[in-house]
Image (tube, rainbow, N blue to C red):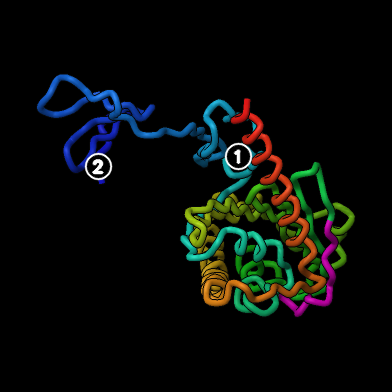
Amino acid sequence: MGTIEGNDLRCGYHGLKFNPTGVCIEVPGQTTIPPGAVVRSYPVAEKWNAVWIWMGAPERADVASIPDVFWLDDPGWTPAPGHLRIEANYQLLVDNLLDLTHVSYLHRSTLAGDDVEAVTPVTTRRDGERISVGRWMLDVSAPPLYAEASGISGAVDRWQLITWEAPANVYFDIGCARAGSGAPDGDRSQGVSMWSTHLVTPETGTSTHYFFSFTRDFKLDDAEVTRILSEGSRTAFNEDLVVLEAQQRARDASPTSPEIDIKHDHAQIQARRTLSKLVEAERRDHGKAAAE
């Protein structure tokens, strides 16, 4: 509730001013500053049109570890970004993003085309900290949001190629092309491509900041297409929000209820297992460092 003064922050209660490192540099009405007047600061970096914060030990911060999402800040791509706050654990949102089957039921007015839940996704593990899941749907109807943004009509070949990168970033290589025009073999010239980017940021154990962007490589300067994608994605993701918040309430009400997995949960299960191993390894590492 304070104010920004240059690069410093002034407290809105008693007027103490703190510099970017968290050190108090001014106390109104006195010349000496108490030595304990320090708040914790965190390393941050601006890259790819986003701000990245390192919440762990400052000496371990490494700008090189920031994910490569260049398309969010590349002149060859136009973003349609947005943000939602969800009253649910971040892992439920990650599960949702890796779940290709719910689209046919939850997003009929935006992202769903033909009912394609019978097309089984293929899941693969990459580089130890990445999980990929994807599928091709051939000779199907274009999703309403895609059709409106691209102007493509008639049957299409559609792709959903998703990558989860630990701990909680998810990228969709998505799009559609005129059916039979060669997209499955690499020729997307008769279609449109988008990177749907999801930077999932935990707030608390039961709340999440959801940063997203539909970023496209077509009609780059068309403000109407940006509006369509921005409003359409927000509409679709608000549909997810309602379900995820209900899911969180149900889990809170009955925390000992078992979780049942189905075959389409394969990618989510692999991501959870990978994350659990990374968390456990980090805890062992921290424990070893503390002992030393």
Residue sticking out furthest to the left: 29
**As displayed, is residue 270 above or below residue 53?**
below
Mark 2 to mark 1 CA distance (whole Å):
34 Å
Q: Residues within 10 Å of mark 2 (few under 14, many from 20)?
A: few
Q: Which residues are magenta?
A: 113-123
Q: Tell me the kind of residue under disc 1.
A: Asp
Q: Is residue 273 left or right of residue 111?
A: right
Number of marks in picture: 2
Which x, y percent locates residue 21?
Answer: 38, 27
Q: In this orientation, which residue lies closer to the viewer: 152 or 73?
A: 73
Q: Residue at x 71, y 75 (%)?
A: 113
The magenta stretch spans residue 116 = yes
**As displayed, is residue 18 above or below residue 102?**
above
Q: Which residue is mark 1?
A: 74
Identify the secondary structure beneath mark 2: loop
Q: Residues within 10 Å of mark 1 (few under 14, many from 20)?
A: some
Q: Which residue is mark 2?
A: 2
